[in-house]
Amino acid sequence: MNSELTKKIIEKIFPEKLPTLEELEEKYPPRNLPDSAMVTRICPSPTGFMHLGGIYMSLLCKKFADQTDGVFYLRIEDTDKKRELQGAKEIIYSSLKDYDLLYDKNPKYGPYVQSERKDIYISYVKYLFSKGDAYLCFCTEEELKAATEKQEKLHLKRGYYGEWAIWRNKTEDVVLAELDKETPYIIRFKSHGDCEKTFIHHDLLKGNVSLPENDMDIVILKRDGLPTYHLAHVVDDHLMRTTDVLRGDEWLSSIPVHYDLVQSLGFDSIRYGHISPINKMDGSSRRKLSKRKDPEANVAFFKDKGFVVSAVIEYLLNLANSNFEDWRKENPKKDYTEFNLTIEKLAKSNGPLYDEMKLRDIAKEKIALMTSEKVFEYVLIWAKDYDKYFYNLLNSNSEYWHKIFNIERGGDSIRKDIAIWSEVYDFYKFFDVEKFVRTDWGNFKSVFSTDEIKDILTEYKALYNESDDKQAWLSKVKDLCTKFGLAPDIKAYKADREAFKGHVGELTQVIRYAVTGRTQSPDIYEILQILGIEEVTKRLS
């Protein structure tokens, strides 16, 4: 290598003043943390919506950092400007805020957006170039495409390596000639491995994994002056003093490249754990939750539907560690942050399966434990953005709706009907007096004839008194049972089924259907009390 020519090349491609590696090491010192502390990060790219998997991974990284008195931080990886979408960064920030995934913002280790760290990366590229571990490549897109097509025809591994790395060993004078012509270039890393040889990577989840050495001369600096993911994340993880990287197992195959870069840059190795992504059943087979196919892949889906955030978080914790469910049963009133997540229980092969019914069950449990005031507050917040009619209805008579949401909310047996806020209006729609439609009896199945139903409603209307307490109300209902051939309670009916048409439940079902238009509803006595005598009388007529 001609040192004078190399110096000329360096001056041409790195004309700006850059921070030295020594200055960077001083600027980003080791963190003052316990030895066992984990410094973790989540590094989404602003290329679209926030994936459920991103929230899942953020939750895991934050939990492990919190449990070890460590640090969890967010880094936006936006060096691929072609794929970046306007507003995507804001979606990332708001999604993490929605899920209470607070991250460290210590300015000492910032900026936390990669496009704002350009000079840092170029400093390391310059270092690699100076030591002969990087080189300029002037290949055109057409040349690279032609090489790929030839590799495919020959059934060879695709990529820029070995004899296909045509600029790897070009002389300095050839390179300078291209620079003088202002030929566009990229900078590639000069690999050190042999793909016929292997090394052992110890993974936090998968244990010891045998991987081929890296022989790919990957791009580390693009024509736009920004680094590729491979270089940028290795540099950032070092300077931000990351100790543990948890990421999707699709990145496991990149470990040889990253290991090669770390060795060449002289960085200490950090721990990697590759996590199986959330899966979904598709017919009889399972597949990765898809951005294109599955609306639930987008975390906005859960906000639109009105899922309780804590329910989604607890569901994800259950996917992460199967013992969370037992822990929750044993600790019904503890905050989920008190659960101790373990790496040992994370899925190591097949990813956890997404099951919306399970999520809904968790959400029902969460809502059942809320006060009517809290339910009203959450429904109002959701409706403001997603259902203006319901929002205005709630605001027009908040006291009325507080009573509605309080039905069967106390005592030992709490109803668990509501899973998501978007279902609330439909569930309680019969309370919307202005829109209540007279009950259609065409589909009502009963032991009574049409005339008997009319008689029941007529007699019940005459005896209904909204001043009655529940016991007095039930007593009057039972008194009607004898007249219409019903047992006054289930015990009497079971003792002699032949003697009765049915039991008291058959009669209350007629009243329920007349008043609500439904065969299933919350406690009918409480419904009657809230609707008031005028509306009840009107519906019984």
Image: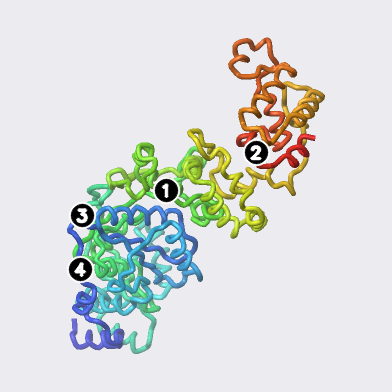
Kindly state the secondary structure of the residue where label 4 is placed. loop
Q: CA distance from mark 4 to mark 2?
A: 63 Å
Q: Kindly indicate whether the residue at mark 3 contacts the one at mark 2 (C-beta within 8 angstroms).
A: no
Q: Kindly indicate whether the residue at mark 1 contacts the one at mark 3 (C-beta within 8 angstroms).
A: no
Question: At 20% across and 68% down in the image, what residue appears?
Answer: 30
Q: Which mark is residue 278?
A: 1
Residue 290 in percent (x, y) is at 48, 52
Q: Which mark is residue 30?
A: 4
The image quadrant where one finds the C terminus is top right
Q: Which residue is mark 3?
A: 199
- Sequence-first disc among 3 and 1: 3
Q: Nearer the viewer, mark 1 or mark 4?
A: 4
Q: Quadrant of residue 190?
A: bottom left
Question: At 36% across and 64% down in the image, what residue appears?
Answer: 74
Residue 246 is left or right of residue 94, and the answer is left
Q: Which residue is mark 2?
A: 527
- Sequence-first disc among 4 and 3: 4
Residue 432 in percent (x, y) is at 70, 47
Q: Disc 3 residue type?
A: Phe
Kindly state the secondary structure of the residue where label 2 is placed. helix
Kindly state the secondary structure of the residue where label 1 is placed. loop
Q: CA distance from mark 2 to mark 3?
A: 70 Å
Q: Disc 2 residue type?
A: Ile
Residue 436 in view here: yes
